[in-house]
Amino acid sequence: MSETFTSNAPNLSASAIWALERLADVRYGRDAPALGWSIARELVNAGFVSHSAHGRSGASITPEGRTFLKSRK
């Protein structure tokens, strides 16, 4: 099943993958690094990150983002 997922996975830049890995890292918690607008847009468009409706809290990784990272290991 992971073969199907990775073949359908969007092409992410190395910077976007790095940012996704930092967001998934438990040690950051609320202190997750701020994302640049282009990286944030790339991750949101891929469905790996979501923002709150008000945009005040930071980005949070989605279940799809976690699955993507697990498939890379």
Image (cartoon, grey):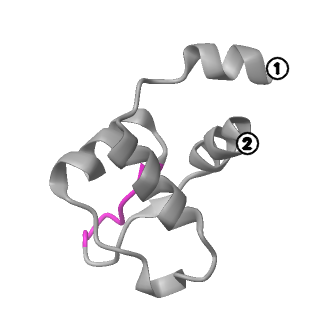
Question: Is residue 41 left or right of 31 when viewed as pictured?
Answer: left
- In the current view of this chain or complex, which residue is farthest to the right? 1
The residues bearing labels 1 and 2 have C-alpha atoms spaced at a distance of: 15 Å
Chief SS of the magenta region: loop
Q: Residue at x 42, y 86 (%)?
A: 31
Tell me whether circle 1 and circle 2 mark residues in contact (CB < 8 Å). Answer: no
Examine the rendered structure and indicate whether residue 30 appears above or below residue 21: below
**Along the line of sight, the residue nearer the viewer: 17 or 2:** 17
Q: Which residues are magenta?
A: 49-55
Residue 35 or 47: which is nearer the viewer? 35
- Residue 24 in the image: state x and y as whole percent: 58, 63
Q: Position of residue 50 (x, y in %)?
A: 41, 55
Q: Quadrant of the C terminus?
A: top right
Total residue callouts:
2
- Residues packed near mark 1 inside 10 Å, few (<14), some (14 to 19) or many (20 plus): few
Closer to the eye: label 1 or 2: 2
Please identify the quarter of the rendering in which residue 25 is found.
bottom right
Residue 60 is situated, as x and y percent measured from the top left of the image, at 47, 64
**Helix, strand or loop at disc 1?**
loop
Q: Residue at 37%, 46% (x, y): give it.
A: 16
> Residue 52 lies in magenta, yes or no?
yes
What residue sits 45% from the left and 24% below the top? 10
- Give the camera-side residue of 44 and 21: 21
Q: Which residue is mark 1?
A: 1
The image shows residue 57, relative to residue 64, as above or below, that is: below
> Left or right of 48: which side holds 41?
left
Q: Amino acid at mark 2?
A: Lys
> Label 2, on which residue?
73
Across and down, in percent, residue 1 comes to 82, 20
The residue that appears at 42% across and 77% down in the rendered structure is 32
Inspect the magenta stretch and tell me whether residue 66 lies in it: no
Which SS class for mark 2? loop
